[in-house]
Image (cartoon, helix red, strand yellow):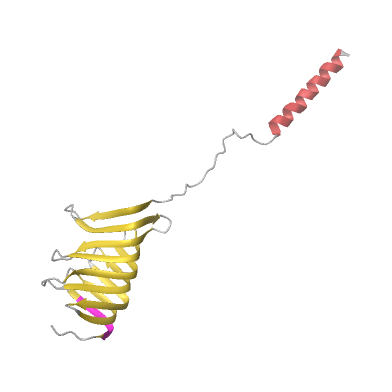
Amino acid sequence: MIYRLVALLALTALVVGVVLLSGPAREGSAVVVSGPTHDPGYSAVKARLVQTGTDGQPLYTLDAATIQQLPNNGLVELEQVQLGFRDASGNQWTARAAHGELAQNSGVVQLSGDVHVFGLLPGTNDPAQIISEHLAYDTNTQIVSTRDPVTLVMSGRELNATGLTASLKERHLRLESAVHGTYRP
């Protein structure tokens, strides 16, 4: 009889052990996940990016209300952007736009949404303004360009065109097509 009771207890312990060991994992168990981790990039509010040249002087500055890096796309998105840069003569230029985009390792800042560029024309003290809905600034070549309708305001006079290329290094500006306005120096 005692053998039956010991056998029954051993069988019960075996069943309880199998149920406990084969049941679902407890909350305290660690789960190992393998694979690449997601890089969320960086984001900032009221931020400033400064790109410096080999001499340590700023090539350009980017101020934005918000900056969001999208590492999977290779882009940095900007909101309420102000871009500051100097031309070959050392004159300061400022571009303002609602939105901006900077492709990593490209050096090209794409601006969109009510873009206004202000600066002094090289060799003069005359202010100039470029107005467009979209505009690009290549920080490597110092070329401002757009294919969209653009307004150029110089010395109080307006020229309207479609497309503009301005090389700040070479002090050369070209309106592409559909130029309207008169300018008499």
Q: Which residue is at 36% across, 60% downward?
A: 78
Between 22 and 161, the one nearer to me in the picture: 161
Q: Is residue 5 above or below residue 109?
A: above
Q: Quadrant of the C terminus?
A: bottom left
Residue 176: image quadrant is bottom left
Residue 177 lies in the magenta stretch: yes
Query: Residue 19 sits in which quadrant?
Result: top right
Q: Nearer the viewer, residue 32 or 70?
A: 70
Q: Quadrant of residue 122?
A: bottom left
Q: Residue at x 36, y 52 (%)?
A: 44
Q: Which residues are magenta?
A: 173-179
| Magenta stretch, overall SS | strand
Query: Picture coordinates of residue 131 (x, y %)?
Result: 28, 74
Residue at figure coordinates x 28%, y 83% from the top left:
177
Q: Residue at x 56, y 35 (%)?
A: 30
Looking at the image, the residue that sits furthest to the top is 2
Q: Position of residue 58 (x, y in %)?
A: 20, 56
- Residue 152: x and y in percent read 24, 77
* Spot occupied by residue 124 in the image (x, y as percentages of width and height): 11, 72
- Asked if residue 24 is among those painted magenta in the image, a careful observer would answer no
Total marks placed: 0
Q: Nearer the viewer, residue 146 or 64?
A: 64
Q: Quadrant of the N terminus?
A: top right
- Residue at the right extreme? 1
Q: Is residue 18 above or below residue 164?
A: above
